[in-house]
Amino acid sequence: MTDVIKTARKANLDTTLLRTLVSINDCGGFSEAAQALHLTQSAVSHHVRRLEEQLGNALFDAHGRRRRLTEAGELFLWYARQILALNDEAFVKLGQQRKVAKDIRLGVSEYFAQDYLPIMLASLRFEQEGIHIIPQLGRSTKLQRRLNDGQLDMLIAVDSPETLHSDMQKGVRLSDRRLSWVGAPGFMLESSNEIPIVAFSPPCMLRDLQINELKQSQLLWRIVYEARDLGDLLAAVKAGLGVSALPLIPSQYGLASPVNLQQLPVLPDVRISIKTAATVEFDQFEWLIQLIRRCWDYPAQQEAEAAPLQVPCAM
């Protein structure tokens, strides 16, 4: 047994405190976790102190203006996730949770449907019998409107860079991604001409982001094609009509970075968030949020290990 965490007297760990610790890590800080959990920041700090007193170890240390997990904190975070997963699974399997919806209308930004949606739907078959996900694909802006209008129960969408520093009232952070300029393989920008831009038709947050960066760079540019959806945009870019900005790995879609990429402005990060409708109790979908997190990590893990796809499922 590792000696990173000191030997402590036997005690029952409060799952409320464990959820607070996990939220601090997943949301990016104490204030962000407080917003996500609907607590005050002092309450979140108190939860951490109670855990540290029980374990006899400091879980966080100061790092500039922020606090980060200590070695003991990193280790205990792993245990906290396992304990919560077993706790939640027991409630689900034994039917002690409040009744969950049988049909869940899930909006998924079309950027991520190909890589993540099939894995998630397959995993659901093993983890939640009788629950049906009704996926609705589209652009984040339009899906957000459907969520606001009560036409969706949950949404996986792209948020603006401002969300990276917000209080996360809009959703739970899934990951952050850098926007990338993409073009057809071998596409080269001509310095003497306007930069040809392939963009989504408005309204579109990504369109607004790339136009804003282009305006600030004072480069000459023009929109040569307005796409209806992702397939339309990818076809236009592959045909060599111009370049576009997407939160994707270019090679996965047969695209590449422009040869003379340095002529284009640096693009900001965007946040991928999980959101629930105002009429939905957040706790009701906690199990689904955890499933989405596991599935989200799987394509990257599969690529790193170069192993055949095995659908993650509950044991």
Image (cartoon, grey):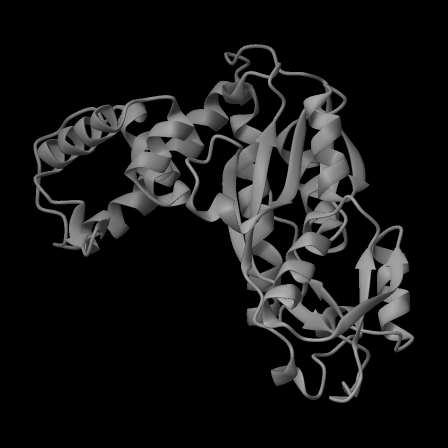
Residue in the image at 54% along x and 10% along y: 98
Front-lying residue, 22 or 154 = 154
Task: Give residue 290's position: percent from left, percent from top.
Answer: 52, 37
Q: How many marks?
A: 0
Front-lying residue, 88 or 144 = 144
Which quarter of the picture shows residue 151? top right
Residue in the image at 23% along x and 24% along y: 43
Residue 249 as seen in the image, left or right of residue 77: right
Residue 30 as seen in the image, left or right of residue 208: left
* Residue 127 shows in this picture: yes
In the displayed structure, would residue 25 be above or below residue 302? above
* Residue 105 shows in this picture: no
Residue 96 as seen in the image, left or right of residue 251: left
Residue in the image at 46% along x and 26% along y: 88
Task: Give residue 114's position: percent from left, percent from top.
Answer: 77, 54
Which quarter of the picture shows residue 225? bottom right
In the displayed structure, would residue 186 be above or below residue 233? below
